[in-house]
Amino acid sequence: MTNPRPTTDLDLDAITAKGWAERTDFSDAEFARAEQFYATMRVDDARLHRVRASAAELIQHWTGHQPRDVGSFGIGLNLETSDLDLGIGYPVEQRDVLMKALADHTTFLGERATSFSTTRLVFAFTVEGIEIDLSALTVADFAVSCRMLDQIGQTMTPEERIAHTWVKHLLRSTGRLDEYAAWKLVTYGRFCPEFNWVPIPEKTGA
């Protein structure tokens, strides 16, 4: 049985064309729906924090590098279907060492483009039924990513988080999956244009 489409009076075409969602785009009734939805996304935070800590401990043990949450949960924009996305900085010239270290613990998903001249290696494993995607970025890209995430954490307002998450939910639930995939990245582009994050090919989460 499919879930009913959510009630909305948002002009999704205008918002996706603009590339950002603000409180002024919402009627009071629409923002109330968005707030209620966002609150439901936060109910599972304690469990996700626990799983993320367990995953980070495993990654630290396997690789010798401390990971950081580089996904939607880390910046408070996740949906209920989201996986956890962790990243590490790892020297490119030692990637064969990393592949061997992770071979018995993870599934290698491939090498993905990250910016105009670099790539990341992507691995997956599961903790308590939640898929963990681990990206091994170049050391420089990881540093840029951390600065970007710090900036998002410090400057993105609660209203912006609510609005962004609601639009993401609407795009996904109405089957606009290409726009949904693009929308997931607009926050990164807004706060750090230098970091051209190219996503893992679309599954269902984040």
Image (cartoon, rainbow, N blue to C red):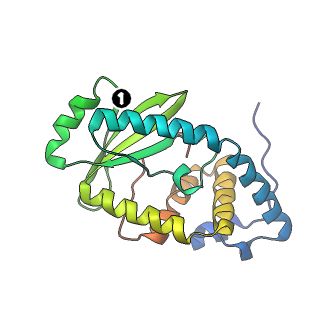
**Kind of residue indicated by mark 1:** Thr
Residue at (60% x, 55% y) in the render: 77
Depth check, front residue: 143 or 96: 143
Return the residue found at the far right: 29
- Residue bearing the label numbered 1: 107
Vertical side of 146 occupied by 64: above or below: above
Dot 1: element: strand
Residue at (21% x, 29% y) in the render: 100
Picture quadrant of residue 55: top left
Depth check, front residue: 132 or 114: 132
Residue at (74% x, 52% y) in the render: 39
Left or right of residue 126: residue 31:
right
Residue 137 in sight in this render: yes
Residue 104: image location, x then y, percent: 30, 22
Left or right of residue 28: residue 117:
left
Vertical side of 175 occupied by 15: above or below: below
Left or right of residue 4: residue 201:
left
Vertical side of 5 occupied by 185: above or below: below
Picture quadrant of residue 201: top left
Is the N terminus in the top left, top right, bottom left or bottom right quadrant? top right
Residue 86: image location, x then y, percent: 42, 45
Return the residue found at the far top: 104
**Mark 1: few/some/many CA within 10 Å (<14, 14-19, 20+):** some
Residue 109 in sight in this render: no
Residue at (30% x, 32% y) in the render: 62
Residue 108: image location, x then y, percent: 32, 32
